[in-house]
Amino acid sequence: MAGRYKSPLTHADVTPKAAWLNRRQIIAGAMAAGGASIASPALASLGARKTSYGSGLEPNTFEEITSYNNFYEFGVGKDDPAQNAGAMQTSPWSVVIDGMVDRPGTYSMDQILEGQTLEERIYRFRCVEAWSMVIPWVGFELADLLDRVGVQSGARYVAFETAVIPEVMPGVRRRVLDFPYVEGLRLDEAMHPLTIMATGIYDEPIPNQNGAPMRLVVPWKYGFKSIKSIVRITLTDSEPPTSWNKANAREYGFYSNVNPTVDHPRWSQATERRIGGGLFAARQETLMFNGYENEVAGLYEGMDLSVNY
Ligand SMILES: Nc1nc2c(c(=O)[nH]1)N[C@H]1C(S)=C(S)[C@@H](COP(=O)(O)O)O[C@H]1N2
Ligand SMILES: [Mo]
């Protein structure tokens, strides 16, 4: 499974992961790798370069991250994606990159990952439903990919689209949303170094329920901006439509920055429930921009964030 990911790193760069994987995660990883011996979990390793992002944060377990999901193409229940997404074939996979770019085309995942240095990014992840996790993603900066295809000077936004495969997606057949799922970012948000394309979790290839083979992660925005299983990326000069805004514009805006002072019309956003914290654990305070205020507040200088929600 890991074989299709080309690691540009030498063996010396690979940090032993056994130290921070519990036994359960190692077993889960070995099973995901197709029954590899539990004594050699490194077989499934992506060899991501360690970074200091998220040092001090306590990551959720692999099992929590991969069994409590939102991926409406596979159903609206939190355990539906883990049940159903395994049927999606994610290799081979290609992504159309088009619009205002110098080198538009259909790129295979191998082409996208060729020469790309994968790194670990431990990020807070805050769903608009007021739950959160800490996830050790593996991926690369979206800016790297955009630089490779050459963004043209008139481009101001990036639009993203998820695969639609009705045969394996019961939620698509039932039209629980207007599919394909679409999302978008302003170009400066897309180029921000915190914005990544994730291809792994816990140094394993990203499971289908989390958005294999490649999904967006924008840690200062509500989780629904982080669109999964991407098949198209389009550079444009106008603000692209986004799925939850289309479904309910009053409740979900284009920006959807995590903001404890701007409540959802139907619930408070001041606090959140950490998944895995236990049923009676105290809710924790939600942080402005999900804790990334120092890094991203400048992107919104002069904007009224209660209007641009
Ligand atoms: N294509 C697609 N992407 C999606 C969703 C979805 O339903 N379909 N759900 C979003 C929501 S609401 C959240 S909270 C996150 C959940 O990501 P996770 O399951 O990896 O935690 O994915 C986002 N990306
Ligand atoms: Mo979400």
Image: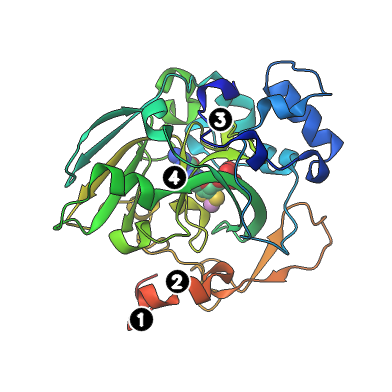
Residue situated in front as seen by the camera: 103 or 81 = 103
Q: What kind of element bears circle 3? A: helix
Label placed on residue 227:
4
Question: What is the x, y in percent for residue 222?
Answer: 50, 59
Residue named by callout 1: 301
Contact flag, marks 4 and 3 (Cβ < 8 Å): no
Tag shown at residue 208: 3
Amino acid type, label 1: Glu
Question: Sequence-wise, which precedes: disc 4 or disc 2?
Answer: 4
Q: Earlier in the sequence, mark 4 or mark 1?
A: 4
Q: Is residue 105 left or right of residue 163?
A: left
| Residue behind label 1 places its C-beta within 8 angstroms of ligand 2 | no
- Discs 3/2, front: 2
The residue where tag 2 is placed is: 296
Mark-to-mark CA distance, 4 and 3: 13 Å
Which residue occupies 75% across, 17% down?
36
Q: CA distance from mark 2 to mark 1?
A: 10 Å
Q: Is mark 4 within 8 Å of ligand 1?
A: yes
Q: Amino acid at mark 2?
A: Val
Secondary structure, mark 2, is helix
Describe residue 305's horizontal placement relative to residue 24 as left or right: left
